[in-house]
Every structure is written in structure tokens, then in C-alpha cells.
Image: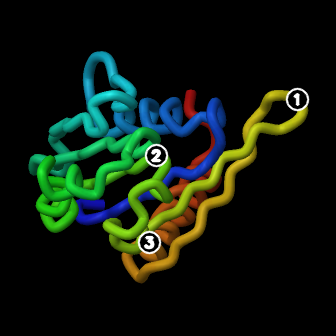
């Protein structure tokens, strides 16, 4: 996860920011997790396995200036280690690397959410396999009391 890029797809209100908030809190981010809609990126640092993990949460919804990619240092961020999460990645597609995990959220008729998670890279496949292992282990251990 220290070098992963997760692309978050879905329409307005699908739950991309809500998913990211829950993931960041699960990773140890304390306090409020803001939507980076206007700032484009919000940085975080957490302790994971005794080491610092840098996390960048991007929202490219309003991204429309190719010069901003270089001027804001996004190229350097994506070249560095750390977890990158990007909402609306299609807006910056020419600049982004291939996502390790691609999460697509869709709103159902009853307002619940469905998701599809795909792993286009070896790192993504490794992360997906790790999630499956965690799920199997949790199921074998039974409910938490």
C-alpha cells in the first residue's frame, strides 16, 4: 500500500469521498477528513507498521489546466512513495499512471451503493489478494465479541 494508486470512479454523490474518509480513518487518520474539491489535494501522514505512510487524497473534478499538474507538484507526488487516492481520475487521465486498484461506485435504486473493485497491476492484484485473505481469516475467526 506504500506505493499504491487507487482510482475512485462514480457519479456525483456515489460515495467516493465517504469511502475515502472511512479508509483514511481505518488507516489511522485522526480528525476531520476534508473533501479536496477546491484544493485538489489533501495530504495526510499516518503511522503504519511502525513507519510513516504519506497519503494524498486528490479530487480532479475541477482539474482543467494541464500546467497545474506540473506547477502544483502532482508529478512529483505520484513519483514518490505513499498512497494516492484520486476521485474523478478521468479528468487528469493523460497525466496519471495506471491505477493499481480501480473502485467504481454506483448508486442503486434504493439509494444503497454497489461497487466494483478491479486490479489492473501486479501491485493491485497483490492488494486485492491481501484483502481476500483478511476476509477469509475474519470469517474463520467468527464474530468479534
- Identified at 48% across, 76% down, the residue is 125
Tell me which residue sits at (53%, 62%) in the image: 102
Q: Is residue 130 above or below residue 92?
A: below
Q: Which residue is mark 3?
A: 124
Q: Quadrant of residue 62?
A: top left
Q: Secondary structure at mark 1?
A: loop
Vertical order, 66 against 37 (above or below): below
Report the colour scheme: rainbow
Whichever of labels 3 and 1 marks the residue nearer the N terminus, that label is: 1
Q: Earlier in the sequence, mark 2 or mark 1?
A: 2
Query: Where does residue 28 sit, x and y in percent of width and height?
Result: 27, 33
Location of residue 16 with respect to 88 vertically, above or below: above
Q: Nearer the viewer, mark 2 or mark 1?
A: 2
- 6 with respect to 117 (left or right): left
How far separated are the C-alphas under marks 2 and 3?
A: 17 Å
Q: Residue at x 63, y 34 (%)?
A: 12
Count neighbours of disc 2 (C-alpha within 10 A) and say few if under 14, some if 14 to 19, many if 20 or more: many
Q: Which residue is mark 2?
A: 87
In which quadrant is the C terminus drawn? top right
Q: Extreme top residue here?
A: 31
For label 3, the SS is helix
Q: For marks 3 and 1, give the CA distance.
A: 31 Å
- Front-most of 143 and 25? 25
Quarter of the rendering containing residue 75: bottom left
Q: Is residue 22 left or right of residue 117?
A: left
Q: Earlier in the sequence, mark 2 or mark 3?
A: 2
Residue of label 1: 110
Quadrant the N terminus occupies: bottom left
Front-most of 59 and 132? 59
Amino acid at each position: 500500500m506504500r506505493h499504491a494508486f487507487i482510482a475512485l470512479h462514480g457519479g456525483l454523490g456515489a460515495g467516493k469521498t465517504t469511502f475515502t474518509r472511512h479508509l483514511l480513518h481505518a488507516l489511522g487518520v485522526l480528525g476531520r477528513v476534508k473533501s479536496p474539491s477546491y484544493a485538489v489535494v489533501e495530504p495526510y501522514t499516518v503511522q503504519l507498521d511502525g513507519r510513516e505512510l504519506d497519503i494524498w487524497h486528490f479530487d480532479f473534478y475541477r482539474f482543467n489546466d494541464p500546467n497545474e499538474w506540473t506547477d502544483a507538484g502532482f508529478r512529483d507526488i505520484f513519483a514518490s512513495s505513499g498512497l494516492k487516492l484520486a476521485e474523478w481520475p478521468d479528468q487528469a487521465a493523460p497525466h496519471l499512471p495506471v491505477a493499481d486498484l480501480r473502485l467504481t461506485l454506483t448508486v442503486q435504486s434504493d439509494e444503497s451503493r454497489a461497487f466494483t473493485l478491479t486490479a489492473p497491476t501486479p501491485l493491485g492484484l497483490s492488494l486485492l489478494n491481501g484483502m481476500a485473505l483478511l476476509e477469509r481469516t475474519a470469517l474463520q475467526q467468527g464474530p468479534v465479541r
